[in-house]
């Protein structure tokens, strides 16, 4: 049941599913499709014939692809899969799950299984009555599943209302919430887990790995979104600096254009009063009007250099002011 649900959680992305894991992979077509979906890569074109040789060739293409990912397929042959050998088929699917769902899980350079266990331990550490030490009996009362969900989506689980002595309710609660809100299909049966002395480790690992990918994927998406927001904020700040530079440069140039004709005016003054007034105006220019404009030019140079540094650090093209507005 767990392996079938896991396969269908991926196959539904391609618009199909399986009903019987022993039978539905026998022709190799859905097996090849499953590998394409979970790897994001294209496999060789399958053979569409109905003969046994066509089925064997398709399964071999799938097994060759798995082997190309560095996976050793011990005692798993295409003929056994085509013949519907349940043990071999389940072994093959578990190998696929290990390679594509669990192997890439890494927490502080641990192995995949240890990494997944460490992730579970850290996420559930603050929760009472939860002590994850393995992938079998630690999950029997259902609290660990609920704790994982509550840690990432606290609005979905009322953890304090769960009772350790009601494992079936706990398990079903986690399974239903995960399916409805997290898009994690139900892969386990609550009654089976409770009534089994030691629940199947492979089944628990497969299901828990779905939580890992769901939550780590959401975290990565949030991180990426935050990174994009930061980039947009930096770009917006740079655009404001460019606009400020252009405005300050335009205002300064406008003042210079108005002032130059007055400074270049050499027309003789007719009276002493006019001469004295012109001298007084020139003193005002030197003492009152010119100093702030010199300061504006210095500020313009600072703004220009600051902007160029920000653009360089952001791997953006250098700023080129409008014609005639380059600071010098």
Image: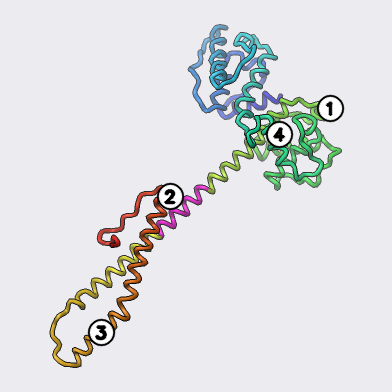
Disc 3 element: helix
What span is colored magenta in the figure? 227-240
Q: Bin the neighbour count of mark 2 within 10 Å (Cα to Cα): few under 14, some 14-19, many 20 and up.
A: few
* SS for dot 1: helix
Q: CA distance from mark 2 to mark 1?
A: 59 Å
Q: Which residue is mark 1?
A: 195
Look at the numbered discs 1 and 4 and tell me whether their residues touch, using CB distance below 8 Å: no
For the stretch drawn in magenta, what is the main secondary structure?
A: helix
Tell me which label, 2 or 4, sits earlier in the chain.
4
Badge number at residue 310: none
State the CA–CA distance, disc 3 to disc 1: 101 Å
Q: Residue at x 66, y 12 (%)?
A: 84
Number of numbered discs visible in the structure rendering: 4
For the residues marked 3 and 2, what is the alpha-carbon distance in whole angstroms?
48 Å
Q: Is residue 268 visible?
A: yes
Badge 4 marks a residue whose secondary structure is helix
The answer to whether residue 129 is above or below residue 102 is: below
Residue in the picture at 80% in, 30% down: 137
Q: Earlier in the sequence, mark 2 or mark 1?
A: 1
Residue 214 painted magenta: no
- Residue 144 in the figure: left or right of residue 268: right
CA gap between label 2 and label 4 equals: 39 Å
Mark 4 vs mark 3: which is more N-terminal? 4
Could you tell which of marks 1 and 4 lies nearer the N-terminus?
4
User: Label 4, on which residue?
Assistant: 117
Residue 29 shows in the view: no
Instruction: Say which residue label 3 marks.
Output: 281
Name the mark nearer the viewer: 3 or 1: 3
Query: Closer to the N terminus: mark 3 or mark 2?
Result: 3
């Amino acid at each position: 049941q767990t392996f079938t649900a896991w396969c269908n959680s991926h196959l539904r992305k391609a618009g199909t599913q399986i009903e019987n894991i022993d039978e539905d992979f026998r022709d190799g077509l859905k097996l090849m499709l499953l590998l394409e979906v979970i790897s994001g890569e294209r496999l060789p074109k399958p053979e569409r014939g109905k003969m046994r040789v066509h089925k064997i060739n398709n399964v071999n293409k799938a097994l060759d692809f798995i082997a190309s990912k560095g996976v050793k397929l011990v005692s798993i042959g295409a003929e056994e899969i085509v013949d519907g050998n349940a043990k071999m088929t389940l072994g093959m699917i578990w190998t696929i799950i290990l390679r594509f769902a669990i192997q890439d899980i890494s927490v502080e350079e641990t192995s995949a299984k240890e990494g997944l266990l460490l992730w579970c331990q850290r996420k559930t550490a603050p929760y009472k009555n939860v002590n994850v030490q393995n992938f079998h009996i630690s999950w029997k009362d259902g609290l660990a599943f609920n704790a994982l969900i509550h840690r990432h989506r606290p609005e979905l689980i009322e953890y304090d209302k769960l009772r350790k002595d009601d494992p079936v309710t706990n398990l079903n609660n986690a399974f239903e919430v995960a399916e409805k809100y997290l898009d994690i299909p139900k892969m386990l049966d609550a009654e089976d887990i409770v009534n089994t002395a030691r629940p199947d480790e492979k089944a628990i690992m497969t299901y828990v790995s779905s939580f890992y990918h769901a939550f780590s994927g959401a975290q990565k998406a949030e991180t990426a979104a935050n990174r994009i927001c930061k980039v947009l904020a930096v770009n917006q700040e740079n655009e404001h600096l460019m606009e400020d530079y252009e405005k300050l440069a335009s205002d300064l140039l406008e003042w210079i254009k108005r002032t130059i004709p007055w400074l270049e005016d050499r027309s003789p003054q007719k009276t002493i009063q006019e001469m004295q007034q012109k001298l007084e105006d020139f003193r005002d220019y030197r003492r009152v009007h010119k100093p702030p404009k010199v300061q504006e030019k210095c500020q313009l140079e600072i703004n220009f250099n600051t902007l160029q540094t920000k653009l360089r650090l952001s791997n953006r093209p250098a700023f080129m002011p409008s014609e005639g507005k380059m600071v010098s």
